[in-house]
Amino acid sequence: MVYAGTKSSLPDIIPPKELDLSSFFFSRARQNPAFNDSQAPRPLYIDGDDPSVTLTLDTAESLATKLASGLYHAAGVRPGHVVAIVMPNSVYYLPITLAVLALGATCTLANPAYTPRELSHQLSDSQARVVITTATLHPLVAEAAATLAADIDILLADTDRAPNTRSVFDLLSSRSFPRQNLGQLAPAFIPYSSGTTGLPKGVRLSHDNIIANILQITAVHQTNAQHPTNIAVLPMFHSFGLVFLCFVMPISGVTTVVSPKFDIAQFLSLAHRYQATETMLVPPIINALTKLPPKTLTNSLQSLRWVVVGAAPLSADSIAALESLLPELTILQGYGLTESSPAISLNPPTASKKASVGRLIPSIEAKVIDDIGRVLGEEEIGELCFRGPNIMLGYLNNEDATRNAIDDDGYLHTGDVGFIDAQQHIYLTDRKKELIKFNGYQVAPAELEGILLQHPGVSDCAVKGVFDTQRQTEVPKAYLVLAGSEPNDPAIAQQVVDWANGQVAHYKQLRAMTRTVLKSRLPNVDVPLQDLPTFFFGRMRQITTASRLDGSPPRPLLVDGDTPSLSLTLDELETLSIQLASGLYHAVGVRQGDIVAIVLPNTVHYLAVTMAVLMLGASCTLANPAYTASELSHQISDSNARFVITTRTSVPVIADAIALLAKLAPRGLDQTLSNVLCIDRPADSPMISDSDKPLVRSIFEVQSSRSFPRIFLKDIAHLRATPAFVCYSSGTTGLPKGVVLSHYNIVANIMQIGYAIRPMTSSKQLTRTTLVVLPIFHSFGLILTHSLPIEGSRLIIMRAFDLVRFFELVEKHKVTETMLVPPILNAMVKLSETAARHDLSSLQWIISGAAPLGPNTARSLEQAYSGVRIMQGYGLTESSPGISLTMPKANRAGSSGQLLPNVQVKVIDDNGQALGEGKVGELCFRGPNIMLEYLNNKEATRAAIDADGFLHTGDIGFVDSRRFVFVTDRKKELIKFNGFQVAPAELEGILLQHPLVRDCAVTGVFDPLRQTEVPRAYLVLSDGALNTDEAAKTIVGWMNGQVAYYKQLRGGYVLVSAIPKSASGKILRRALCSTPTAC
């Protein structure tokens, strides 16, 4: 198993003591006889453009020493100073950097493709005093330096120089100078690395870091060629190129051919001319090589034996493709970061694994952690973290960023997601950071967003990386919210992109198609960085404190509609939540990361139970108490719930579910149910016995006042990554999927909905009353049960819905608002005469959701119930669930409300192209309320959330200029029965288990009586079914006994001879509409 502190199995390296990098390099390079031949020493470097320019070890050392003297005496470079190297690859790169290091100064390495703006940031941040560059780049450097307050001395690494400039070759001196060794922990290089926020950050790499990484790499990989020659492709300013080309290759006895720019034709020509034996490449170049004619490759690269690949993972297919064309070639993948000098892993020649990015190199310790920091085991996927002598000192001038990157135990948190196998090979599966990797370069979206926002034509924007199949790399794509009267004008968008591309280096440019994204017209809300219990109780205390200023006793926050004496004030709710959390911890064993199944109807104790679970850092999976044992066992198994909290009534179905799980266990189901608890009082609770030990207890039996380790989440990373609820949502295929909603998702949606309903409530003193009708286990009921109290409303809990009882409770409790679904609203219109016998004058607002409400129904309802206003909403379980909501003073007939704050939308056609305002297509949304993922289902997650973070809803509609959402159709095949989602595929799977069913299909049909969709089955009976109608009725009756009531075949059945299907086997549901009326 791989745990924290697990070290590489390779022998540790032993860095030499008290040697700076310059001294270390020359002492090691001199141990290679090829470079010490007094008659004909092999060159370290050859200029690819001018082969007459070469550099041997002797000339490199002499040049470095004389240049150090010149920099000291003529340029004033002193220990601790920073010298910026702004150069393309050159045979002089190594001696220039070693000269700087010999003086005890530090090199900051800059990309010569930078714009003046980008370069001025690096020069300013690093406080560089001297810049060494080329005549070609002098105008760029001069423009960047002119923006800075401090004077900067610009030196050229050319023999040909511009007027009024100096060349480093003019400074060469044989005068003595005080050679400095400030210790191996002194910074040697400050390369700049893109972070996920703001501008690039300076990475402080010490002499010891670089020396250690050289020793780590050379311990794994040594050339065995007789005349090893390398073609330099990677830029030397990049940490990968710096360490390999300037240090590892020379120390290994390899001659390097250098050119200032990469060109694939020149690369092939140089490889052929110099019979190159090895090189270092990045995946896009590998992919480009595989597309060349095989003869070109074999003629040019026949001598090539080793290729080291880094900067980004290379697929096993790409490796196999190139190695098949060049049978003598071995491709070795490596992995690392600028922050690790850079190498962490490298595939050894004799133990390579094509799919891995290498094995841990010597002296590296690794740990893999989950989203809350727990260390995972071997081959478990999580964030990769590493510790070793090559890990950076820290980020320059940025202690906060350093603390976020390196934990208290010295581990660098990479932001890369993957796992480590038993042989210590690393596999990358994803990236936690938002960095875009273009041809090996890191691009920070936040930097590009900051530039775009400076343009007067942009009111908001986002930048994401998307994979370009032609370039075989990620490219930056901008999503723009344009200012002015033409928010969808592609010409204006292109002008913005062209302007932004002029501000940045070539690899940061916006290369993908830029699509318009529509943003909510409402102002963004700030999402508090608090876990849900801390946020909820903190906000509620502000309200109840205000309500007690007049000295009155606290009003109940939660009241049982049928038994008003059963109630909880805020203080009682919080105290009960804490005591239940203590009991769950001490008596039941619930721990951080566990999942607890909540199988409850509406009850005043619902919030206390969920808050208790969340206080422990555990998560709740909310289940419908109407589920059958089969349905419940699926959810418990899929969520890996170890505890169940339920009622006395549901205990028998829980027992059946446990029995089903026990039957599945021999097939490999890893499922243990540690405890089942009831919310009924002890005297009323039954027992399910496990031998002599009772398995079921009342939750009030375990209630405790003992202290416990309450989990508080405060930083955004943990809040976004820690699940609060796992709600199950029907997909278009198979069984329901677990929707993972984080604390951040829920708190964000509470804030978003709160902004929308605030004009409705207009009270912070619990003077309003909400009747909770919707099931709290449903995401719609769950979020409003949290949102409405924070906006000043107490909750009357209705245990089970009955319309007449609903009227009675509105009258009894003077209810001011409630949440309903369209079928109930339709019934209210039809029963308006019954309603007239009750005083419903207190009712002012009804929030309608879960399915669209027709404008005629809304109008009829408001006419029948004077003073009532309808607020329509739209959302999905996957969006926590709120996306849009009608504002009290902003309504449009037929719409599902206005986009909530912080929500962005794109409407796309069948080809994925974004459409403009008023155009009908699939609705896709992005915001802080969008789910983390589908539990244990990466494929479904990828299908639902695209590379830009937009949730594809499957609903068809459009968005108007004021950001009202109109839903016109549904792309998905889900059936919506009274607000519940029913997946046809699930019902078809069950029907096909019946021996009399040969084939079947299920669709939704609208029931005018019930005013909702209902499932209808189309049946092809097996040959043995003689009495077809009788057989079909038997099947339907059997089927209805297998599922919850809302999934039952209320639409009847239709007997057909065949189910229409496409060539690929997909059911053509539209074709079923022409079949006869159902029985």
Image: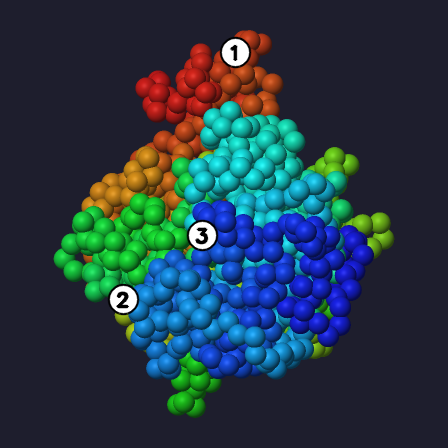
Q: Determine which of the numbered discs, if any, sits on residue 1075 in the image.
A: none
Q: Quadrant of residue 344?
A: bottom right
- Specify the amino acid type for callout 2: Gln
Residue 5 coordinates in the image, percent (x, y): 75, 63
For marks 2 and 3, give the CA distance: 34 Å
332 and 643: which is toward the camera:
332
Tag 3 and tag 1, C-beta contact below 8 Å: no
Quarter holding the C terminus is top left
Q: Residues within 10 Å of mark 1 (few under 14, many from 20)?
A: few
Can residue 913 be seen here? The reply is yes
Of pointers 3 and 1, the one earlier in the residue sequence: 3
Mark 2, residue position: 454
Mark 1, residue position: 1027
Can residue 899 be seen here? The reply is no
Judged left or right of residue 557, residue 19 is: right
Q: Determine which of the numbered discs, if any, sits on residue 260 in the image.
A: 3
- Specify the amino acid type for callout 3: Pro
Q: Nearer the viewer, mark 2 or mark 3?
A: 3
Residue 990 coordinates in the image, percent (x, y): 56, 29
In the image, residue 464 above or below residue 395: above
Q: Quadrant of residue 1073?
A: top left
* Residue at image point 35% right, 18% down: 1076
* Residue at image point 37% right, 21% down: 1072
